[in-house]
């Protein structure tokens, strides 16, 4: 494969990753509610970190050894498994610890069956 093409691929993936991380950071700063902030952090940051890890895997995997590439692929898979679990857990904790007037919820699916207090 052409080394210049690989360098452009790495640069493109890293740029996309940084842009998505920037969008995620701006979403965390600008969005009004804890749930929408977690949505921005969960979606955009997952894609940003995945692109950055893939760029690092290609960079180190092509130049040194292929095991670094597969290590980065494993990290991406673990990130895709753990990120939704973490954001769901944080959303449930935020919902359970908030005062009743803190959120404007149109549909409150988690409110049914929760103990009071």
Image (tube, rainbow, N blue to C red):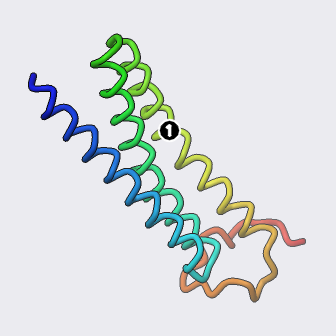
Q: Position of residue 45 (x, y in %)?
A: 48, 54
Q: Secondary structure at mark 1?
A: helix
88, 52: nearer the viewer: 52
Residue at far right of view: 117
Determine the residue positioned at 74% across, 61% down. 93
Q: Residue at x 68, y 70 (%)?
A: 112
Q: Tell me: 70 left or right of 12.
A: right
Does residue 67 appear to the left or right of 28 in the view shown?
A: left
Residue 57 at what x, y percent from top left?
36, 27
Q: Nearer the viewer, residue 35 or 9?
A: 9
Per the image, the residue denoted by label 1 is: 79
Which residue is found at the position 38% from the left and 60% from the top?
A: 19
Counting from the top left corner in percent of width and height, residue 100 is at 77, 84
Q: Position of residue 61 (x, y in %)?
A: 33, 19
Q: Residues within 10 Å of mark 1 (few under 14, many from 20)?
A: some
Count of all numbered marks drawn on residues in the image = 1
Residue extending farthest front: 4
Residue that protrudes farthest toward the left in the picture: 2
User: For this view, does 69 lie left or right of residue 34?
Assistant: left
Q: Which residue is pictured at 41% across the width and 54% down the height?
A: 18
Position of the N terminus, as image quadrant, is top left
Q: Quadrant of the C terminus?
A: bottom right
Residue 48 in the image: above or below residue 101: above
């Amino acid at each position: 494969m052409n080394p210049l093409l690989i360098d452009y691929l790495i640069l493109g993936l890293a740029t996309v990753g940084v842009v998505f991380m920037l969008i995620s950071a701006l979403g965390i700063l600008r969005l009004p509610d804890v749930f929408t902030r977690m949505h921005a952090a969960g979606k955009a940051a997952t894609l940003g970190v995945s692109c950055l890890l893939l760029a690092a895997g290609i960079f180190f995997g092509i130049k040194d050894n292929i095991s670094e590439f597969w290590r980065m692929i494993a990290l991406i898979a673990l990130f895709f498994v753990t990120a939704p679990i973490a954001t769901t857990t944080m959303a449930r904790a935020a919902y359970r610890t908030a005062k009743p007037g803190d959120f404007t919820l149109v549909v409150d699916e988690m409110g049914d069956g929760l103990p009071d207090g």
